[in-house]
Amino acid sequence: MDCTLQIFLDDHWIDCAQIELNGALCQWNHLIEYAIDHPDAPVSLVEPVDLEIRATQSLPAFAYDLVPQGAGRRFLLGELELPDGPDADFPLICAGAFNPIGRIRVAEAVKYFDEHVERHADARGLPGMTIDEVVMRGPDFAERMFLHGMLGTGTTGVQGAAPKYLLTRDRAGLLHGDAVLPDANAVQHLIAKLPRGSSAADEKVLRNEAAYMRVAAELDVRTHPDLPTLHGDVLLIPRFDRIARDGKVIRLHQESVASILGLAGFDLRPSLFEVVAGIRKVVSDPAAETLEFIKRDVLNLAMRNTDNHARNTAVQLIEGRVQLTPLFDFAPMYLDPELIPRALRWYRPDTKAELTDWGDVLAALPIPDHERQMLAEALSRFAVQIERLPEIMAAQGVDHDIIEFLTQPIDTQVRQLQALKPLEA
Ligand SMILES: Nc1ncnc2c1ncn2[C@@H]1O[C@H](COP(=O)(O)OP(=O)(O)OP(=O)(O)O)[C@@H](O)[C@H]1O
Ligand SMILES: [Mg+2]
């Protein structure tokens, strides 16, 4: 079984690489013509464009960013009549990765999608929907989403556990399934995210995700200039991997930290020291991105966003620079009914003991001393902002019981960050 990857460059999809899977052996390589013409546009930031044939025991790590997850995965497994498990990942890519986040897609999946549209003549030329129609999710909506990209039970192009739809706004302000609206008509790209489950707690987590993102923006953590907005139980999230400009759409390279670290599969748990090392290897300004990452982790701890797994951090290539993407999936995940403990932690590289104090983490980071000094100074300044978190959260509409619950974790962060001050001397 094999597949051809395509990359979106200069307004075109171009064949760039192929993956071949034979039983337990996987081989992949760039296409010769592509490697010659586009040496600077890799499919993964840790895979140089060259003529080598790579052999691996599993799919290449970057391919896991394309594997449908959650509701989209369940839907496609049904369509393909496949049992779930790691063996399903490759067939799922070959059918489902026709329109993923980022700028890589799978040619066979595009064909699969085109055939789906072909079979449903009504799919063409349907009018767009208003946000109210999305919120109501009536029978018309379900039908439309099915026709507009097999999205009836969740989308195949975006990962994560919560049900989502990839939507695109047209010039008239109406919303369409992303895969069917031509680029020339697109003005804004959105993810419509629904609660993970049907309990009141699921709804509360998603409602507060909107407020949490506003808090992060107030604290100068990198966020998309257009923040998510809540409509009924639907969180409408503007996408940062697409830029619609002058009737064209620019698709940006986006890659999870899991891919950067070469982690094949899901649910692998690197130490946060490995995560930082991976980020530093690919970004344009390692010192700035290390600070950005640690600030996000301070917020994760202070605001109990426990679900900090390796696919909830990603990097992007934008205007020639590689950096962490704007923040995403930042919510009071401690409330999730599935009881999600903090996924990734700071395990000391030598002893593997968990470090829970910023002084110890900074001391153990393998970075030059002058950078350690700068980090300590910046983080001790951040303490002033973290101290104001309760009032900022209240102003941004975080639920009162959450603010109350966070009193102690916030105090702990403030105390630890303030204690970094003496390093300045
Ligand atoms: N604004 C955005 N622009 C582009 N891509 C995004 C954006 N927000 C999220 N993503 C991508 O979509 C994926 C799923 O989104 P998100 O993490 O919010 O969903 P989730 O279902 O809550 O995930 P999880 O399973 O981690 O709880 C992310 O891993 C990321 O790749
Ligand atoms: Mg996520």
Image (cartoon, rainbow, N blue to C red):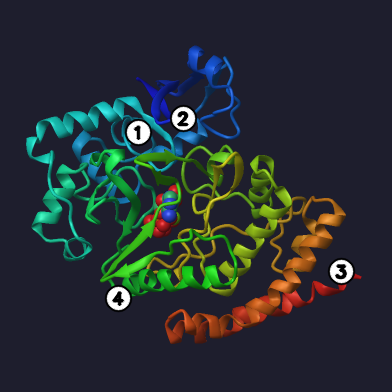
What residue does disc 3 label?
423
Quadrant including the C terminus:
bottom right
Distance from disc 1 to disc 3, alpha carbons, whole Å, reads 49 Å
What residue does disc 4 label?
200
Q: Left or right? Give the position of 193 relative to 344.
A: left
What residue does disc 1 label?
93
- Estimate how packed mark 3 is, as few (under 14), some (14 to 19) or many (20 or more) residues with alpha carbons within 10 Å: some
Q: Is mark 2 within 8 Å of ligand 1?
A: no
Badges 4 and 1: C-beta atoms under 8 Å apart? no
* SS assignment at label 3: helix
Amino acid marked by disc 4: Ala
Mark with earlier residue (1, 3) = 1
At horizontal 61% and vertical 42% (from top left) the residue drawn is 321
Q: Left or right? Give the position of 297 relative to 127.
A: right
Q: 165 or 266: which is nearer to us?
A: 165
Mark with earlier residue (2, 4) = 2
Q: Is residue 284 above or below residue 59?
A: below
Mark with earlier residue (3, 2) = 2
* SS assignment at label 4: helix
- Estimate how packed mark 4 is, as few (under 14), some (14 to 19) or many (20 or more) residues with alpha carbons within 10 Å: few
Q: Left or right? Give the position of 262 relative to 370.
A: left
What residue does disc 2 label?
59
Badges 2 and 1: C-beta atoms under 8 Å apart? yes
Residue lying farthest to the front in this orientation? 246
Mark with earlier residue (2, 1) = 2
* SS assignment at label 2: loop
At horizontal 33% and vertical 49% (from top left) the residue drawn is 187
